[in-house]
Amino acid sequence: MLLLELFIAVVIVLYFGLLLKYEAIRVIIILLFSVVGIAGSYGVAWFGIRVNTFANSRTAFAGLRGKPYPIYRIPLEAGNEYRHDADQRRAADDADYSAFHSARLRRALFIGFAIGESLGAAALRIAGGIFTKIADIGSDLMKIVSRSGR
C-alpha cells in the first residue's frame, strides 16, 4: 500500500503542482488527505476481513451442531457490524470536511481523500476479496461435512 501511495504522490505532485499550477498548500493538503484516504480504506478492509473470517468460522462450527438459526443469525450480525463501522467512518469524514473554512481548501481535501480512498479500495478489494472468498469456501465445506454426518 505504501508503494502505491508513493506512486500516487508523484502523480499528484506532477498533475496538480506542475500541470494545473495549484499553490503548494493545496498540493500538500491533497497529498496529506490521499494518505488519510488510503489509510481509511486499509482500516475498513482490515476490519471487514477480520469480521468476515470470524463470522465464517463461527458459522461453520454452528453448522456442526445442526441447528439452523445460528447459521442464519451469525452472518447477519457480522454484516450489520461491518455496516455500522463503515457508517461511523463516513460520519467522521464529513466532520473532517467541515473543519476547513475555505472552499478551496475543502475541495483540495476532498480531492485528496477521494484519490486515496478509491485507489486503496480498488487495491484492497482484490486482496480482501480473495482472502474472504477462501474463508467462505471453507465455511461452505464445513456445512457440507456437517450435513453428511461425518
Image (cartoon, rainbow, N blue to C red):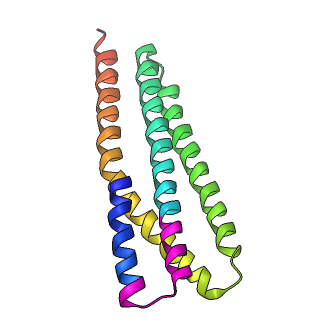
Q: Main secondary structure of the magenta part?
A: helix
Location of the C terminus by quadrant is top left
* Above or below, 54 relative to 27: above
In the shown orientation, is residue 149 left or right of residue 51? left
Residue reaching furthest to the top: 150
In the shown orientation, is residue 9 left or right of residue 91? left
Residue at the image position 28 percent from the left and 15 percent from the top: 148
Segment tinted magenta in the rendering: 17-34
Q: Quadrant of residue 110?
A: bottom right
* Above or below, 5 relative to 140: below
In the shown orientation, is residue 34 left or right of residue 3? right
Q: Is residue 8 magenta?
A: no
Q: Quadrant of residue 21?
A: bottom left
Q: Position of residue 31 (x, y in %)?
A: 48, 70
Q: Position of residue 77 (x, y in %)?
A: 56, 38
Q: How many marks?
A: 0
Residue at the image position 56 percent from the left and 82 percent from the top: 107
Residue at the image position 45 percent from the left and 63 percent from the top: 117
Q: Nearer the viewer, residue 7 or 115?
A: 7
Q: Position of residue 38 (x, y in %)?
A: 46, 59
Q: Position of residue 139 (x, y in %)?
A: 35, 28
Q: Is residue 24 magenta?
A: yes
Q: Nearer the viewer, residue 19 or 86?
A: 19
